[in-house]
Amino acid sequence: MTSPALVDAAALTAQLTGPGRLFAAIDAVPTTGSTNADLAAAARGGAASGTVLVADHQSAGRGRFARRWEAPPGSSVAISMLLRPAGVPFERWLWLPLVAGIAVADALAALGVRPQVKWPNDVLIDGRKLCGILSERVDDAAVIGIGINTTLDADRLPVPTATSLRLEGCAAPATAVVAEVLAAFEPAYRRWASGADLRRWYGEHCATVGRDVRVLESATRAIEGTATGVDAQGRLLVSTPVGERAFAAGDVLHLR
């Protein structure tokens, strides 16, 4: 018999759905291949905007550039949201992982930790990665995936530069973590959808802005400079010896 999910979907549904709310349906499963892949398939099948899927474990989770992402069962939580942002120009969708990062940072701050976002898709605590974000376009829908290390112990960290809520002294149960993230994401998403200028707001949360960085555009090409901010489209602005560059994608290393 399959064990129930650690996350209480009924409690989340009662708290976060209803008339006028962003989220329409919230489901939780103990394990799946990839919550983003599941919701991408649901999007193609016509699933409603505001559909949320949460899993205690992913066996085929993905990060940027199709990297595999997996953690031991019960040591993390994966949250994916299917949204159909009608009327928002596609060029503005680059902001979605950035907005999700702000929401996660605000949610975790409410749980007693002090996170910062790293452009474009990570949430850090003291430079260590706690959360990764993956946003994908599926026709007229966006699927936004958030993976948070919750109870991962030091001897199970995938890399020495990772961390978890447990290691940072936060013992919040998985349902509370998901509730805080979704509650913070709703107003952040509405702010994005309104067309507001998000540059200063993002800069206040971002550990990348003001840092010397190396941007990896490919396996063989890297650009170094100082991150000065983001532009109206959410691209990272980097001052280099040959002028300012704007990056829509790329792995970013914070240099010492």
Image: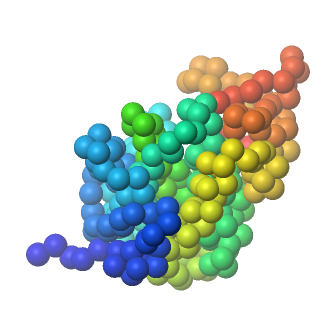
Of 133 and 25, nearer the camera is 25
Q: Name the residue at 45% across, 50% down.
A: 83
Query: According to the image, what is the colour scheme of the structure?
Result: rainbow
Of 160 and 103, nearer the camera is 103
- Residue 119 location (% of width, % of height): 67, 44
User: In this view of the protein, can residue 63 be seen by the observer?
Assistant: no
- Residue 241 location (% of width, % of height): 88, 21
Q: Name the residue at 43% across, 72% down.
A: 18
User: In this view of the protein, can residue 35 be seen by the observer?
Assistant: yes
Residue 254 left/right relative to 147? right
Q: Name the residue at 81% across, 40% down.
A: 229
- Residue 16 location (% of width, % of height): 47, 73
Residue 240 left/right relative to 193? right
Looking at the rendering, in which quadrant would you find the N terminus? bottom left
- Residue 50 location (% of width, % of height): 42, 57
Residue 132 left/right relative to 30? right
Q: Name the residue at 57% across, 62% down.
A: 186
Residue 76 lies in what quarter of the image?
A: bottom left
Of 36 and 220, nearer the camera is 36
Looking at the rendering, in which quadrant would you find the C terminus? top right
In this view, 61 is above or below 31:
above
Residue 37 lies in what quarter of the image?
A: top left
In this view, 225 is above or below 79:
above
Of all residues, the one furthest to the front in this rendering is: 19
Q: How many numbered marks have been drawn onto this rendered protein structure?
A: 0
Of all residues, the one furthest to the top in this rendering is: 242
